[in-house]
Image: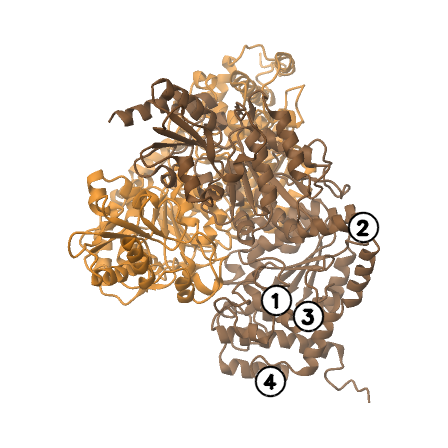
Chain colours: A orange, B brown
Amino acid sequence: MHSSSLPHTNPTNKLQDMASAIRFLTMDMVGAANSGHPGMPMGMADVATVLFSRFLKFDASDPTWPDRDRFVLSAGHGSPLLYSLLYLCGYNDIDVEDLKQFRKFSSRTAGHPEIDQLAGVEVTTGPLGQGFANGVGMAVAERILAAEFGDDLVDHYTYVMVGDGCLMEGISQEAISFASHNQLSKLIVLFDDNSVTIDGNTSLSTSENQIDRFNAAGWHTQEIDGHDFEAIEGAIRNARLSPRPSMIACKTVIGKGSTEKQGTAAAHHGAFSASDRANMQQLYNWQELEFIIPKTILDNWRAAGTRGVPQRKSWKRLFADLQPSKAQEFDRRMMGACPENLSSALSALKQTLLGSPPTATRVASLKVLETLQPIMPELIGGSADLGSSTQTHPSTASTFSRENPSGRYIPFGVREHAMAAIMNGAALHGGFVPYGGTFLCFLDYARHSIRLSALMNLPVIYVGTHDSICVGEDGPTHQPVEQVASFRSMPNLNVFRPGDLIEAVECWELALQERRPALLVMSRQALPVVRRDVETNWCKLGGYVFKEASSARQVTLIATGSELSLALGTATILENDGLPTAVVSLPNWRLFDAQRSDYKEFVLGSSETLKVAIEAMSPIGWERYVGRDGIICGIDQFGHSGPASDVYTHFGFTDKAIAQRVQDRLKR
Amino acid sequence: MHSSSLPHTNPTNKLQDMASAIRFLTMDMVGAANSGHPGMPMGMADVATVLFSRFLKFDASDPTWPDRDRFVLSAGHGSPLLYSLLYLCGYNDIDVEDLKQFRKFSSRTAGHPEIDQLAGVEVTTGPLGQGFANGVGMAVAERILAAEFGDDLVDHYTYVMVGDGCLMEGISQEAISFASHNQLSKLIVLFDDNSVTIDGNTSLSTSENQIDRFNAAGWHTQEIDGHDFEAIEGAIRNARLSPRPSMIACKTVIGKGSTEKQGTAAAHHGAFSASDRANMQQLYNWQELEFIIPKTILDNWRAAGTRGVPQRKSWKRLFADLQPSKAQEFDRRMMGACPENLSSALSALKQTLLGSPPTATRVASLKVLETLQPIMPELIGGSADLGSSTQTHPSTASTFSRENPSGRYIPFGVREHAMAAIMNGAALHGGFVPYGGTFLCFLDYARHSIRLSALMNLPVIYVGTHDSICVGEDGPTHQPVEQVASFRSMPNLNVFRPGDLIEAVECWELALQERRPALLVMSRQALPVVRRDVETNWCKLGGYVFKEASSARQVTLIATGSELSLALGTATILENDGLPTAVVSLPNWRLFDAQRSDYKEFVLGSSETLKVAIEAMSPIGWERYVGRDGIICGIDQFGHSGPASDVYTHFGFTDKAIAQRVQDRLKR
């Protein structure tokens, strides 16, 4: 009765058939769409089969179970792999019709995996290398959360699948170095070592030894045949035991199974011929038409999808037995709700800051972080080696490290790009609101990860300090000019540029409450504390009349950040000159644009009012508020090295110079 | 008479004294400015002394001698090192007064080295890691130029000094991997291995073995005591002999000489106390007051500065003996002049393209590159693993590699960031106009290097294809929305978005003629060839009336790129509806803004004209042209995965939908 010649009872044959299901679904999806990237899914089908059927802790019926293992497909173009797996394992959100809609408009199976389209997708991937660093962020989050809530409640792995392209991107090195330095032992990277990229063989552009590279950083490494099921299983087992992060180089054949394309760049993207599918059917003893999976094989996959049910149930029991306050806090954290007393804590802080001597707005970050430490343990973060300069290192937070998993201050190193992607990963994991600081200028290094924060609408907070030419002596390489305009053009990103210490606290509050990506643009130099009232968070409106004109308005000065106090000085000159002048503070365009039009007109003034924008950076976009007849006091060139006040004066940022421009215009 | 006890005749003492000069000048510069970063200059003073006095091929009297060795201070915050060296070696452009003006407004000795401030500075550095990749670009340029003009004329090394921070930035890995793959044997990296960054000891954030890391990529590596003159000399000698790029890890003490700060992060920046200087005087047997160098020591340095005179003279003789045409071409290349027949060649190309079937604008790149190959050998470049997608791989160009140094197509690998920085390096070297292509969206990876192209105003050409939501199925991760706006905000960068094949050729021509950084934004999808005349390069004006209204204008449609043909279709509908409508093509804002105001008004129409901007991307900035009462048809959210036409329609980009918006507005 029990015969080893029956193909589907031999464990290797069983895995082989399960992998074949991925290969055929991939071929069929790409065929139906007549576009897409099948090479990686077909090459990594065997590895994925072992991972999902033997190791990955998940329950397809509950894709958001907090203690599931995380699986990140960094090589996001291989999305058919992920969609096949989710379908085969029985995730509710996806059925075979969705596979047929691959890459169609408004389908769940987008060209690259998107978190908001399909449950089971852990992260939106596509731009190479990002997913690797996202995985690092998830592993960081897991470790800190485990330290806080106990490793009976939080104990899972993060698996990341990367390709040659991911490892060529610089961000991967930042991720590699950070992960091993912090001994993120539950991070396992599966490298699809197929030696092919879009343009051809990797020998065209790289000759690195990846194993040596990871070893140099202190990783646990293994090299296996990515089509040998036993080797795959053994390697993942070893990796899970290693006290270090682990990389498994899986030597694979790209597009494996396609006799016409496998092993070549032609398999990277594009559909297959009918004869190629026929050959592959013969090869894998597959009888089925497109999108049809034999019942035995589907049953085996569905069993993989329910394999985690007992684990999840036992976790649920554990959770039910928790102290109610602890369970409530865990839920709050995973849902991403702000603590109830956030506003009151920050209102109290504002009260203490009223009447402060001139202070850089960057200082607000430190004050906010120190105020919130006791009530917002979800605030984790740090800086890219500029902790003290960016004021993002609260003295009350201990430093995260391999020895101190509960540290909330993370020294990211000189790695702005990975910092941002790690923040994304931690936010995706859940339980945290990550923040990260560097000079505003150097956020350009992280721009693509910031774009992904915005695309995924993640609650992460970027703190960009030294926000203008007032950086001073460090010169134009360190002086942002175009950054604020460029970030304002990014959808979803909430860009704040507060004008004094009080506004800075208000912007921090909004950044936390809005639960979307925020950029807080902070000054290096001290600014007068000009706000006199703290009862209302005026920044919530995006812009507001900071000081009304003495009588019927003739001029509206609109300023942000360090230029707010300058505008107030300018207004005084103009008022003394008989020109009734209002000052508007506009720390956030997005929030202001969302106000009712009558409010906006009330703030900006009627069409007869001369409107003057004052912002010591790129003028692009200000026409929206000042119209074609207004004046924009901006800077459309790079800065200069020199003491901040000299540079500021050089570019015309004095109350007298601006008042003169206004007077000249009105005299015309 | 010749006694070894005389300190300045012992070769080591002589070097020690020369290094002391750097240390004291650094201390004095930072003291006078009361700011700056002395730790690196003092730590690397010994290495720099050996390099400049024994190896570096240069002649201080001719800083632009084409065959000089290049020296790149990637850790640009260590600028006092470079300024000291240039002054001590006797460069004409700098005297001791300049050192006293360190970091002052409009001084030549800016906070970070800036190429336009001081001859002898090879590259503007400051943002960490960039200089490393710039050095790689210089070494590429040297190799290709040597292959072309002969290695008697072109034969020099590139030395790059990097710090821990440079090596933590991801771009360094891209540079490492590219350099060894191409066996850039004349690239020598001197790593200031001091284990300290701004925030403290590097053990805070990294535990990589840098030697192993470089070895993994195939570099020649050495590890030395960076304060041992003999070891430094031996290591540089070895490095020059290696057939591979070479990295020397120089173990140094940051701020060496400062008894109060050396070896700690406190030495990274900030001035020293009087007692610290006094102690250092004792330590190095130094008697002088601030900024004074003993004559013997200065003489030794000046001798180092003239050491290359015979080499330069013999090079000049060699050059004088060249065939005149070859010498002329070499001069043209190093001066960066366009070939005289550039315009005629591209005019002829345009002629052949007239009446072409619909074609993607990206195709123009290939046609231009193939047309210019014979007459513009300075055009070198490639893509970040998207040669065929971006159409930047001309079939007529052979591929640059270790075996083929004369290849003009460079496979940069999946390394957008290093690609851009390598382009900058090649442009800085001279002799080349580098170009590099990737998807427009992924230029965000390279943004900081593009910023440096702009800051240095280098003639480099970025080709960003797949320029809108019309990327289609690959979805929002691959669909640029905010990129064009964000690049328009960057000073100096010439952003072009041509509307058809003819305009695309014209924009290429302008990008080459303008000799400043350019971004060519090209479509993936085919666009109708709508231009009918090719005699004039209309794009030179930035914007022009593409089609005048049939009678007194009521509407002006202003479009770029793929929206130009859409605007033409819309105009037809509106004209049929009785609304005289003009279509304006505006491929380059910068060039258009520079036109006379009467021309601009002529193009855009009078204030009574309804102005409508049509660009399938972020609307930011368009108010400049349409005013507050105009219409902006843009996209202020991320895109969607799906066939291009579905996505385009979804966002309202059809002639009917836009015509409707115009009609609705005019009926109000």
Q: Earlier in the sequence, mark 4 or mark 1?
A: 1
Do we see residue A523 in this rendering? yes
1 vs 3, front mark:
1
Q: Are marks 1 and 3 on the same chain?
A: yes
Q: Are marks 4 and 3 on the same chain?
A: yes
Give the chain letter at badge 2: B
Per the image, the residue denoted by label 1 is B82
Give me the disc on residue B49: 3
Give me the disc on residue B288: 4
**x and y, in percent, of residue B271 in the image:** 49, 74
Local crowd at mark 1 within 10 Å, few (<14), some, or many (≥20)? many
Give me the disc on residue B324: 2
**Cβ–Cβ below 8 Å for labels 4 and 3?**
no
Q: Amino acid at mark 2?
A: Pro
Give the chain letter at badge 4: B
The residue sitting at 33% across, 39% down in the picture is B627
Q: Earlier in the sequence, mark 4 or mark 3?
A: 3
Q: Amino acid at mark 3?
A: Thr
- Cα separation between marks 2 and 1: 37 Å
Task: Look at the picture and state if B632 lies above or below A291.
Answer: below
* Foreground residue among B311 and A255: B311
**x and y, in percent, of residue A185 in the image:** 51, 46
Q: Quadrant of the N terminus of chain A?
A: top right
